[in-house]
Image (spheres, coloured by chain):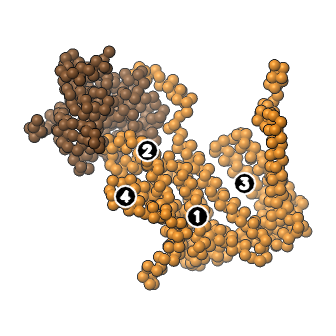
Chain colours: A orange, B brown
Amino acid sequence: MASQGNQQQLPSGILWLRENLFPNWWNALLTVVVVWLLVELVWSLADWVILHAVWGAVDPEGLVPYDEQWRLLLSAAVVVGLVIVTMVRLARGSALAAVWAVGAVFIAVIMWDMVASIETNASPEACRAPEAGACWAVIGDKYRFILFGRYPFDEQWRPLLAMVIFIGLIVFSCLKLAWKPWLALVWAGGLVVCAGLMYGGFWGMRFVNTELWGGLPLTLILSVVSCVLAFPLAIALALGRRSDMPIVRAICVGFIELIRGVPLITVLFMASVMLPLFLPSGVTIDKVLRALVGITLFAAAYLAEVVRGGLQAMPRGQYEAADALGLTYWQKMATVILPQALRSVIPPLVNSFISTFKDTSLVVIISLTDLLLAAKVSTADPLWRPYFVEIYVFVAVIYFIFCFSMSRYSQWLERDLARGQRRDARQKVAVMARSGPEGGGA
Amino acid sequence: MSPEHEASAPEHEIAIQLLGVNKWFGAFHVLRDINLSIARKERVVVCGPSGSGKSTMIRCINRLEEHQQGRIIVDGIELTNDLKNIEAIRREVGMVFQSFNLFPHLTVLENLTLAPRWVRKMPRKQAEEIARHFLERVRIPEQADKYPGQLSGGQQQRVAIARALCMQPKIMLFDEPTSALDPEMVKEVLDTMVELAEEGMTMVCVTHEMGFARQVADMVVFMADGEIVEMAPPEVFFTNPKEQRTRTFLSQILH
């Protein structure tokens, strides 16, 4: 009894620690070992990434100059603060997103001068020092090529602007207020502007052939445009596969199984090498366009099966209720079945989008310089050859930012769409209590 | 039995006519030679043991199930494979299901206005007016902006009735509308149906609520093993059934 009384006087944090991390001697030992390993790992990573990293700034040892190091420490402190705010759930949902956004802007502001100096002072000399960590100077030297590939150097503001418009379009499409029919027009307009910027050939902008497109804009164009086109195609294929009409069904099943049965590389190879052989001489189709078609068809086959899963999970009663009200097939699908079916398959849909985004890196085999190939090419520079890891880390971070954003968005979307329609037990009781009197009296 | 003769009865008097209807689920003969004629404003209650084909029969009336033999004529239109006919009949026939089948992704008001707006091409404002009118009728006007999942079973079924009424159908089909409800919610749904019956709606109702049958039915149809065993006005049906099977059934459900 006495010890129990003692326990209750302890702060809850220590109580939690005792119960979960140190309940007995072997768990305590395990906790200590794991914590030690974690600290070692984080410390050596931090050492490589930040403390001994060569940022290219002028300093005899290639390190961040002494009077600039406060920027790193302050940034690290902000990150730690953000992580703590997230973990103890001081803020949630959009408030949390806002806190992170403010933090990111703050870090960007204090790091700006230092990062800017990476580009101007990029030199591999400092990285050769034996105690040097990550050689971020290589990014400073190569980032233009990694991001934009072989696009003419002094015209690279065009793909940058196109990319900003493109990402703007995507973010805009994620907002619920944009889910109206006119969104298709916005996309059409946005894509025309992007294409105009990328191609050029008017208003004093030099014409740039798709052969020279590359880097992140190419990766984004290939993945986003093919997903946007593949999605409606996938819905059509999924509906076709469940159609009563045998020929329609056979065509859809044939297409889906054929495309799913071969690797993406084969599809790309067919589109790039075999297709021109079948075309009449003199007719050529743009290589990027061919890759786009290949990826679209491939993504559509996979998405179609995801959508079909959603359709099959729909209770029969929903079809019957829509039929009984006299809705036609297309009205029924558009207003009753698809809105519910697609909602239920958001996680696998996003899964497919993410893997399509990463699969676009396979266009290397038809020698399109996407983000990954541009990175690989830039590792070939003999001056910077030992620092390929930094380049790949840089590219990995870019891929991660996009994929992680998609994942988070889908989780938010799922929760947002479910709100109001499913209720937990507590809400149910409240509803019953409120509606009880008039419900019973009716 | 002479289907041609029955078919020639004055069309405007007859709302639903089933002539020699047969249906099989695989090898299982679920409907055997069903002949049934329902006049306008007539209220028919269909009862019978489970598996007797009563749900299948009323689901044939709006082609949720396809019959394989015989003729079904609804509101003067014969049910064939012609999609036009099927859609025309479904516009005039409302249906209420055992499991409500409300659209969970739409609010109550959206559930009610969906079909009038898409099928009847009604302007949104008019459709909403009608929807609110029928919500008033089923006594839940305050639930218009909730989702079906936030309502009790009885409320959901009343919304489902209102949803069917919003299409202003000539005929209403009820497929065991109270079987999925908790006992305390059965009455609120039955009250709504009684009101509807008293207003002169043509109704076909599959139910085991014999009190309801006594109160409103013009005709009680007893089905067993896929055939109509007995058909009589409620006062005869409950007090003086002719068939042994009817008597057995009644003794089982009336205590």
- Residue type at tag 2: Met
Q: What is the x, y in percent for residue A119?
A: 77, 69
Screen quadrant of the C terminus of chain A: top left
Residue that protrudes farthest toward the bottom in the picture: A281
Kindly identify which numbered label has been placed on residue A314.
2
Identify which residue is drawn at 33% across, 53% down. Answer: A244
Q: Do the residues labelled 1 and 3 touch (CB within 8 Å)?
A: no
**Do discs 4 and 2 belong to a common subunit?**
yes
**Front one among B3 and A219:** B3
Q: Cα distance, mark 4 to mark 1?
A: 28 Å
Screen quadrant of the N terminus of chain A: top right
Please give the residue where the numbered disc 1 appears in the rendered image: A359
Residue B31 is drawn in which quadrant? Answer: top left
Q: What is the x, y in percent for residue A379?
A: 73, 72
- Mark 2 belongs to chain: A
For label 3, the crowd category at 10 Å Cα-Cα, with few meaning under 14, some 14 to 19 and many 20 or more, is few
Q: Counting residues from the N terminus, which is met first, the one under dot 1 or under dot 3?
A: 3
For label 1, the crowd category at 10 Å Cα-Cα, with few meaning under 14, some 14 to 19 and many 20 or more, is some
Q: Is residue B186 depicted above or below A91 in this figure?
A: above
Q: Counting residues from the N terminus, which is met first, the one under dot 4 or under dot 1?
A: 4
Q: SS class of the residue under badge 2?
A: loop
**Do discs 2 and 3 belong to a common subunit?**
yes
Please give the residue where the numbered disc 3 appears in the rendered image: A105
- Residue type at tag 4: Arg
Please give the residue where the numbered disc 4 appears in the rendered image: A249
